[in-house]
């Protein structure tokens, strides 16, 4: 009998992680507070008051970025920022990073240095130190980063913890990184067709392109909260898209939710891009990924204690039986599908998932 062969796309990224987790079994380590299943793992230090969080995220050429439209310095910055975002989503401070580089022969020493200038800039900005890694030859450019962060045990915020009646809140604006990707892919097409004669005018798209190429982790927001002595009840960062992350928060918290599409903050430039492509901007905001904003649950009586400019209320948590719904700007209530960016779901071999 031949071995069964289940294509990974049949169960998807999260289905695969569940299967792999089942092989590992439940960890029994007494210091482990959170293993697989949140934005970062959390373990207790011997003083019993401090915890470390640890998270890894990789950026792969052809899957997460295309070299033609991605300056290497920005790529280095983004590789750190997306990991810091997961640390921020635990309400912790990043401390140390390691990095594994897979370098194809078309990458020169100078290019690797450019990548590292971006990495250094992000480390300075977020206050962490790169302390090591590994370097290997590879067929395409791969950057895998691990970040360790630190917090007091009572500061940590998990994906679980939201309760019916809590407000569903988000920092910044959504959909811009996806809009930036749309513009960049269009530019890539023109660049390929017209070669060096092509003179792009990207000025009208400055904001959305920056959101795609140079995202920021919202450490500024969690630092502000810490100063005010505030802590949301549950939190996640938006990497795969709002809809997918709402589902994660609800599943872990045992809640339902209602999202008001009209309340989702969207930048004017993002609307312009959606118009240009004759697409619905709500789709960008709900399902476009890589915003790296924070999505969190706040008890209504805490609302006045937050800086109102730093976030928007976009819905509320409900009892689980009420499901997860979105109210369209026209007022209709429809189920919010957990769609968003998921590896293996779209492409054949996971290659060029994002780009084709
Ligand atoms: P995020 O989008 O916040 O980075 P992911 O969706 O990538 O989170 O991962 C969800 C959870 O699954 C995290 O706890 C992560 O550490 C874990 N995870 C992802 N891939 C693996 C793997 N190959 N082996 C073990 N754990 C994994
Ligand atoms: Mg995350």
Image: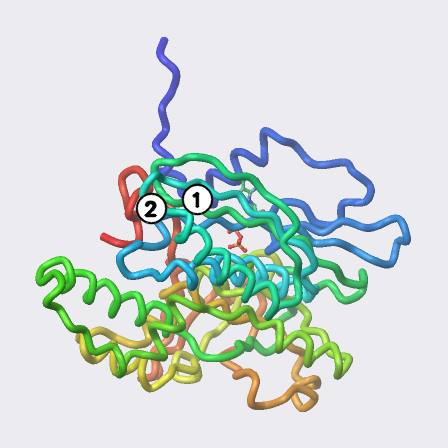
173 sits to left or right of 273: right
Q: Position of residue 195 (x, y in %)?
A: 12, 60
Residue drawn 68% across the image and 70% down it: 233
Q: Position of residue 348 (x, y in %)?
A: 27, 39
Tag 1–tag 2 contact (CB < 8 Å)? yes
Residue drawn 36% across the image and 65% down it: 288
- Which of the 4 image quadrants contains residue 73? bottom left
Residue drawn 70% across the image and 86% down it: 301
Residue drawn 68% across the image and 53% down it: 148
Instruction: Tell me which label, 1 or 2, sits earlier in the chain.
Output: 1
Q: Position of residue 277 (x, y in %)?
A: 18, 73
Q: Which residue lies under the disc numbered 1?
A: 13
Please tell me how crowded label 1 is: few (under 14), some (14-19), or many (20+) other residues with Cα within 10 Å. some
Name the secondary structure under disc 1.
Answer: helix
Q: Position of residue 1 (x, y in %)?
A: 36, 8
Which mark, residue 345?
Answer: 2
């Amino acid at each position: 009998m031949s071995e069964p062969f289940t294509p990974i796309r049949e169960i998807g990224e999260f289905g695969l992680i569940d299967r792999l987790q089942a092989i590992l079994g439940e960890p029994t380590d007494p210091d482990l507070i959170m293993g697989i299943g949140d934005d970062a793992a959390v373990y207790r230090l011997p003083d019993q008051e401090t915890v470390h969080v640890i998270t890894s995220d990789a950026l792969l050429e052809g899957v997460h970025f295309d070299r033609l439209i991605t300056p290497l310095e920005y790529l280095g910055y983004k590789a750190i920022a997306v990991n810091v975002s997961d640390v921020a989503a635990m309400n912790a401070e990043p401390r140390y990073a390691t990095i594994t580089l897979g370098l194809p022969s078309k990458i020169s020493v100078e290019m690797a240095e450019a990548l590292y200038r971006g990495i250094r800039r992000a480390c300075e900005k977020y206050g962490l130190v790169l302390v090591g890694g590994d370097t290997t030859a590879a067929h395409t450019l791969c950057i895998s980063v691990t970040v360790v962060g630190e917090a007091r045990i009572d500061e940590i915020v998990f994906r679980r913890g939201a309760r019916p009646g809590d407000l569903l809140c988000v920092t910044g604006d959504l959909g811009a990184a996806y809009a930036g990707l749309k513009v960049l892919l269009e530019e890539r097409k023109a660049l390929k067709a017209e070669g060096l004669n092509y003179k792009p005018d990207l000025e009208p798209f400055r904001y959305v392109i920056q959101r795609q190429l140079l995202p920021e982790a919202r450490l500024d927001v969690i630092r502000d909260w810490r100063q005010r002595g505030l802590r949301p009840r549950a939190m996640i960062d938006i990497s795969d898209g709002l809809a997918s992350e709402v589902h994660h928060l609800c599943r872990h918290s045992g809640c339902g939710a209602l999202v008001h599409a009209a309340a989702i903050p969207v930048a004017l430039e993002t609307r312009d891009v959606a118009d240009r492509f004759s697409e619905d901007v709500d789709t960008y905001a709900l399902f476009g990924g890589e915003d790296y904003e924070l999505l969190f649950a706040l008890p209504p009586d805490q609302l006045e204690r937050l800086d109102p400019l730093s976030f928007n209320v976009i819905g509320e948590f409900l009892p689980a039986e009420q499901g997860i719904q979105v109210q369209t700007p026209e007022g209709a209530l429809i189920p919010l599908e957990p769609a968003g960016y998921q590896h293996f779901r779209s492409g054949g071999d996971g290659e060029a998932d994002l780009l084709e």
